[in-house]
Amino acid sequence: MTKTRMLRGAAVLAAGLLATCAFVGQVPVTPRGELSTRQAAGEYTGFVPDMQRRQLMNFVLVTTAGIPVLVALGC
């Protein structure tokens, strides 16, 4: 191996190691009790979609699930 090739490989390795640390954020420090209560509660907001939205969501779900079935059946 030539020196240039070894230096290039070392540079790529160093760049890779730096890139793995680039997108890691710091973990926020919170008291234990607050963290466990927040995770267990799931922060329920009380939002329930009205009937019109529920029917629309059900229609979208049934049609998107039904299209592959119809294609598989050859309709």
Image (cartoon, helix red, strand yellow):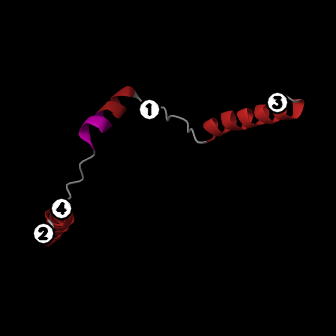
Residue 4 in percent (x, y) is at: 87, 34
Residue type, numbered disc 3: Met
Q: Main secondary structure of the magenta part?
A: helix
Residue linked to disc 3: 6
Q: CA distance from mark 3 to mark 1?
A: 46 Å
Pointer 3 or 1: first along the chain: 3
What element does badge 1 sit on? loop
Question: Would you say the residues marked 2 and 1 are in contact, meaning their CB atoms lie under 8 Å apart?
Answer: no
Observer-side mark, 4 or 3, equals 4
Residue linked to disc 2: 55
Residue 45 in percent (x, y) is at: 24, 53
Residue 63 falls left or right of residue 13: left
Residue type, numbered disc 2: Gln
What element does badge 4 sit on? helix
Residue linked to disc 4: 72
Residue displayed at 55% across by 39% down: 25
Eyeballing the image, is 10 above or below 68?
above
Residue linked to disc 1: 30
Residue displayed at 49% across by 35% down: 28
Q: CA distance from mark 4 to mark 1?
A: 52 Å
Label 1 crowd (10 A; few <14 / some 14-19 / many >=20): few
Residue type, numbered disc 4: Ala
> Which mark, by number, is residue 71?
none
Q: CA distance from mark 3 to mark 2?
A: 63 Å
Question: Would you say the residues marked 4 and 1 are in contact, meaning their CB atoms lie under 8 Å apart?
Answer: no
Pointer 3 or 2: first along the chain: 3
Residue displayed at 13% across by 71% down: 75
Q: Which residues are magenta?
A: 37-42
